[in-house]
Amino acid sequence: MNATIPANWIILFGILAVVLLAVAVGFIAQRQQQSKRLRLRFGAEYDRAVAELGRTKAEAELRAREKRVEKFTITPLAPADAAGFTQAWNALQGRFIDNPKGVVVEADHLVRELMLKRGYPMGDFERRAADMSVDHPAVVENYRAAQAIAVRDERGEADTEELRKAVVHYRTLFDELLEVQPARRAEPARQIPVHS
């Protein structure tokens, strides 16, 4: 008994194999493009998430952050608000020598207040850092470093140099978040042509 496969079935299987291969290649290319986009957007935060969760879960988490933050109304500060925050920061920084532990706590509170004013919701620290990483990935590591020192300070384990570093980390974050909405310039008065 000689079983032969008709030529049209062979052609159909060949076409199906080519289509499946094209879909697989397209899927892989799309994932690589998505990974590249996330890596470029999140920088070191991408690497941290991948190390912590693995690539697939990390990328899903980063995409979820993007979607969550898209729903926020993040706004730049009015110049007057920015001036008030800057003045508060300068006063805080001037008290460091007399009270380094208190200044670290104040810096954390001032950064939280600034985040809230800009429109970031105030969840727990990890949620705040995750939300902020979407728009400010370059400085979120500063936030994590400052927070780690603050936690160690609460346990009595941080020295004055570490507290100084925490304030520097908070300052880097503060400066990044202090995005100011440009003041509106008055429209120039329209010249009315004079006819003689």
Image (cartoon, rainbow, N blue to C red):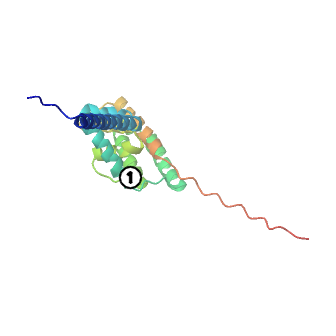
Identify the residue position indicated by label 1 in the image: 70
The front one of 94 and 173 is 173
Q: Dot 1: what SS?
A: helix
The front one of 162 and 82 is 82
Q: Find the residue positioned furthest to the right.
A: 196
User: Residue 5, located in which quarter of the rendered image?
Assistant: top left
Q: Is residue 158 visible?
A: yes
The front one of 161 and 50 is 50
Q: Quadrant of the C terminus?
A: bottom right
Q: Is 172 left or right of 5, judged from the image as shown?
A: right
Position of residue 17 measured from the top left corner of the image (x, y, whole percent) = 26, 34
The front one of 21 and 38 is 21
Position of residue 41 measured from the top left corner of the image (x, y, whole percent) = 41, 38
Residue at the spot x=21%, y=35% of the render? Answer: 6
Residue at the spot x=46%, y=49% of the render? Answer: 88
Q: Find the residue positioned furthest to the front.
A: 1
Q: Find the residue positioned furthest to the bottom.
A: 196
Q: Quadrant of the N terminus?
A: top left
Residue at the spot x=29%, y=51% of the render? Answer: 123
